[in-house]
Image (cartoon, rainbow, N blue to C red):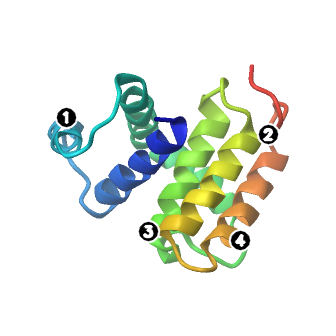
Amino acid sequence: MTRRDSREWAVQLLFQMDLNRPKDMRPVLEHFWADVEADENVRDYAERVVRGVMSRRGELDETIAAALEHWDMKRLAVIDRNVIRMAVYEMLHCMDVPPVVSINEAVDIAKYFGTAESGRFVNGVLDRICKGLERPSRTAE
C-alpha cells in the first residue's frame, strides 16, 4: 500500500465530513477503517491529512479562494474542493512531501473521483497556489 492509497482514503473521508461535518472525528474514522484494509502507515498518513485539513480548514479555504478565478468555494464540486484542500494542506504543512508530488497526486485523484474536467481544474488552482509558496516545489525538507 502507498501514500496514494492514503490520499484516496483521505479524500473519501474529507468528502464525507464536508457533507456532514462531525463534532467528533473518532467515530467517523473508526467506522471508515472498519470497512477498509490498510496497513498502519497508510492509515496513519490518511488520518494525519484528514485531521490536518479539518483543523485548518478555514486557513486552507482562504488560500484556495484567493487562487480561484471567477469561482466561489461554494460552487466547487465537493470532490474537487476536498482534493484541493488535501493538496494545499500537504503543500503548506507536510514538509516531507514536495509540492509537485501533492499536485500530481491531487490531479490523478481528481480525475479518478471527479468529472472529466476535474483534473485540469484542480491542476490550475494548485499551480497558482504553488507559485506563491516560499519553499522549493520539487524537493522535500
- Foreground label between 3 and 2: 3
Position in image of residue 97 (x %, y %): 67, 31
Horizontal side of 135 relative to 2 (left or right) equals right
Q: What is the spatial separation of the Cα atoms under label 4 and label 2, in whole angstroms?
A: 20 Å
Question: Which is more toward the observer, 61 or 81?
Answer: 81
- Foreground label between 4 and 3: 4
Horizontal side of 37 relative to 10 (left or right) equals left
Q: Quadrant of the C terminus?
A: top right
First reached walking from the N terminus: tag 4 or tag 1: 1
Q: Residue furthest top?
A: 141
Question: Which is more toward the observer, 133 or 6?
Answer: 6
Q: Residues within 10 Å of mark 3 (few under 14, many from 20)?
A: some
The label number, if any, that marks residue 81 in the structure image: none
The label number, if any, that marks residue 26 in the structure image: 1
Q: Are discs 4 and 1 less than 8 Å apart at CB?
A: no
List the residue tagged with mark 4.
120
List the residue tagged with mark 2.
133
Residue in the picture at 53% in, 36% down: 3
Horizontal side of 136 relative to 12 (left or right) equals right
Horizontal side of 61 relative to 136 (left or right) equals left
Position in image of residue 65 (x %, y %): 62, 61
Identity of the amino acid at label 3? Val
Identity of the amino acid at label 1? Arg
Q: Is residue 61 visible?
A: no
Residue in the picture at 26% in, 54% down: 21
